[in-house]
Image: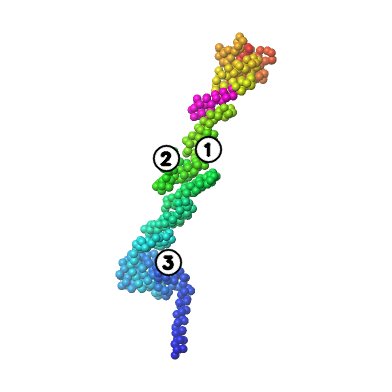
Amino acid sequence: MIAQFSINSNRTFVPALLAAWLIVCLVPLSLIADESNAWTVQKINESKPWDALVGGPKVRVEGRMSASSGNQFRLQNCEIAFSVEKQKLQAIPVKSYVEIRGQFKKDGSKIVFAVDEMKIVSRYSQQYALKASRLQHPTPKDWIELGDWVSERAKFYEDPELAKLASDAYSKSIDVEYRALKATNAEGRFELAKKVADFGLPDRRRMELVHEGCRIEWQNVQKADPPDIAVWQQFAFSLIEKLPGADVPLKKEDLVLKESYNREPDLTYRKAKDDMRPKLHRLFYIAVTLKFVLYGASDDGRDGDAIADQIEKLIPEESELAETHRLKRLEYGLKNITTANRIEAEKLATAFQERHQNETAKRALTEWIKAHESRLKGDGIVGLLQLADEYLTLLNNRQAAVECLLEANKIDPKFEDVKQKLFALGYQWHEGRWVKSGIGERQIVESQSATGISVGMTASSLRSVLGQPRSLARAMTARGITEIWSFGTAGSTPLVIRLEQQGGDREPKITALSGEH
């Protein structure tokens, strides 16, 4: 009897065991019921085809009722019909949030979900609030899991209210993680900024973290001893990549933001409206750029032009600051004018003139000439000729130039270049001394000469009549270029002709002739 009972039991047990084994093998593990977690409508839809689930373990399902008829009803967006006792169904209002328990079964040729238990549950928003209230000392992971739970339902039902709750949960996870960061942790803030983007949170929050991370990085790179200026430059250029608008020059009126931003950058940034933040990015870039441009600047202003060039290139809106450094360079040049060469002196004077500082320009040139006047005079006639030329071309000081030429003439009365320059300046040799012509510089001879040469004739015409001059002297005057051509053989009275070329003239023209000296 005992043996017979054992055999019969095995005959009954083996098919049941085989059936259970087939269910386990054929049904994906993710679909085997876990009554501790209710299935969503989305999970039911994704479980198709449902044939493998027929007769399987019972599961719990949550969703929103959308319609009912007879003993069947539907959950919103669900592709399978649910069957239940009509009495139970009548007790549940349509549109209710429900939790049901049952299993997949065949109903003729169709598969339905047969409901054993059914009850009304809170709305998803209420469930969210309850779940959130139960969190004790929540970690970022806790908030992310709650956010995922409500986000899944928000997407499936296209529910903006639930989407907002999901954002709220994700935002709280960011808050918790942010509070745990050290004040010096820039990289942690950049990583949080990426999470903000991944969670689809407002970009405003992401940019606050990026900006704050950049500010911390800037503090850290400045701590290097000795300072690494190349790193400062590299950091400035990195701001252009991380902070939109950092490479866009500001308008003059936007520079008023500089004071508040430099005083409290993080607070000012958090309070700023979205359209103001790119301007703050630029102010950050300006501050960093000025740091490396001005580092090591000389106190006396000698490098003022180089600094100004950098400022105008990298941050053109700081033109006033650039001009301040150019003025420092001009002051340095003025203080050291005695060691400058002529080109440098002229450039310095021109810079003062461009700024309408004509008296300072004149002072610079005068001091430059005076600085080497004694040396030039010591060089004799050649030095005095150069000195006269500098008084004329740089200061238009005809009186000083004449004094130099007269002094040269005393050294050698026969030196032709000196006599021609005096003649060009309107002087004549009369009764053993040089005197100012009484009839004017332009009218020493006004009538046509015996050779057919006359006032107004061009240099090329003069050359075609008389050929090349025996000597030619050229001087720069206030009116333009003056040339003295001398014709004749040695020992004879030369024919001296003065030509001038003024602003619009293509070539010099005769303004005076003289056959006496």
Q: Residue furthest top?
A: 431
Distance, label 1 to label 3, CA atoms, is 69 Å
> Which residue, given by chain and number where applicable, does mark 1 sit on?
297
| Relative vertical location of residue 453 with respect to residue 72 in this rendering, above or below | above
Residue 366 shown in magenta = yes
Q: CA distance from mark 1 to mark 2?
A: 25 Å
Q: What residue is disc 2 on?
A: 256
* Residue for point 62% across, 10% down: 432
Q: Residue 271: x, y in percent? A: 39, 47
**Looking at the image, which residue sits at the far front?**
225
Judged left or right of residue 343, residue 8 is left
Which mark sits nearer the N-terminus, 1 or 2?
2
Residue 47 in view here = yes
Badge 1: few (under 14), some or many (20 or more) residues near its Cα, within 10 Å?
some
Q: Residue furthest bottom?
A: 1
Label 1 or label 3, whichever lies nearer to me, is: 1
Q: Is residue 487 above or below residue 40?
A: above
First in sequence: mark 2 or mark 3?
Answer: 3
Q: Magenta part of the protein: which range?
A: 349-373
Which residue is label 3 attached to? 43
Q: Kindly identify the amino acid type of the residue bearing the numbered disc 1.
A: Ala
Q: Amino acid at mark 2?
A: Val
Would you identify the image quadrant in which residue 475 lies? top right
Q: Secondary structure at mark 3?
A: helix
Whether 293 is drawn above or below 96: the answer is: above
**Amino acid type for the residue under numbered disc 3:** Lys
Quarter in which the N terminus is drawn: bottom left
Q: Secondary structure at mark 2?
A: helix
Residue 191, x across and y down, in percent? 47, 54
Q: Residue at x 44, y 70 (%)?
A: 31
